[in-house]
Amino acid sequence: MFSFDSVNHSWMIKFLEHRIGDHRVIRLITRMLKSGIMEDGLVRASEQGTPQGSILSPLLSNIYLHYVLDLWFCRRIRKQSRGEAYYFRFADDFLACFQYKADAVAFKRGLKDRLEGFNLALSAEKTRSLEFGRFARANAVKRGQKPREFTFLGFTHYCGKTRDGWFKVKRRTSRKKFGESLRDFTQWAQSARKVLSKGAMLRGAKRRVQGHLSYYAVTDNSRMCTTYHYHATRILYKWLNRKSQRRSYTWDGFNQALDWIKWPKPVIRKDLNPLRRAEAI
């Protein structure tokens, strides 16, 4: 996780000029960069940082990290690593994986200098190194500890096993995202009951549950998806029945309404098992 309040404008323009040949577009972006940063409700002009609240800010930040981090890892770090090295990034959140600990240590040491050279810094509380993989569980048990796990893009990744006992990366919905999703659904239901009809509220709830399952219903995450489906269904039942003083639905009537709108089922929608995907080709 990074802070973009100190992005160097000169470097940003150099990066943009690699792909944009129209100097009028460059001048327009330069003006937007210099539009300032809001602090305590006041806009302060700045020679660094990306404009907060601008629709252009996420795009510019992504371009900046592409040149500062993505290309650097692919063209230098991966080639210099003694073992396998992999890198994944989404927006300002990234994950670097190394076969050997020495390569990971060297990367972390070089990362600080690399980012400082472009006026960036890592968020200390959200940055950590951990052992993960085939031998992580056994090594942790020897130390009298539990194997470490990490959260990336809303999923908690942990060391698991297949039915045959082989190592497997497994994923579940992170506790934080799970709680946020249910709180958001509850707040929506509380507000929707005041302005939507029963049918519109049912259809709106269906879209929200479908959206959650479309992202989180992946291999090995069926338990968390089933739990979300269970709670979301009961939250909807509760707030539908508070649309008026008289109770709107019995459970039988509510289930019939769910069948009518084709209420989504908590089934796995994305198979992340590479062997099964290869067999299907």
Image (cartoon, rainbow, N blue to C red):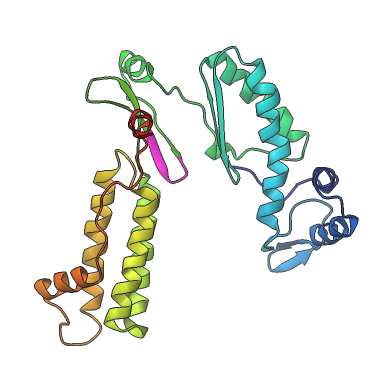
Q: State the image coordinates of residue 251 (x, y, percent, origin top left).
A: 11, 71
Query: Residue 168: within the magenta?
Result: no
Q: State the image coordinates of residue 178 (x, y, percent, origin top left).
A: 35, 52
Q: Is residue 203 above or below residue 93?
A: below
Q: Quadrant of the N terminus?
A: top right
Q: Between residue 103 and residue 221, name the one nearer to us.
A: 221
Q: Residue at x 70, y 59 (%)?
A: 56
Q: Is residue 221 above or below residue 188?
A: above
Q: Between residue 248 and residue 86, name the one nearer to us.
A: 86
User: Is any part of residue 50 visible from this angle?
Assistant: yes
Q: State the image coordinates of residue 37 (x, y, percent, origin top left).
A: 74, 60
Q: Quadrant of the C terminus?
A: top left
- Farthest residue toward the front? 281
Q: How many marks?
A: 0
Q: Between residue 117 and residue 61, name the one nearer to us.
A: 61
Q: State the image coordinates of residue 271 (x, y, percent, origin top left).
A: 34, 39
Q: Main secondary structure of the magenta part?
A: strand
Left or right of residue 261: residue 174: right
Query: Residue 154: within the magenta?
Result: yes
Locate residue 246: give its quadrant: bottom left
Q: Is residue 186 above or below residue 245?
A: above
Q: Residue at x 21, y 58 (%)?
A: 230
Q: Residue at x 24, y 52 (%)?
A: 227
Locate residue 36: give its quadrant: bottom right
Q: Residue at x 80, y 43 (%)?
A: 15
User: Is any part of residue 4 visible from this angle?
Assistant: no
Left or right of residue 47: residue 274: left
Which segment did they paint magenta? 152-157
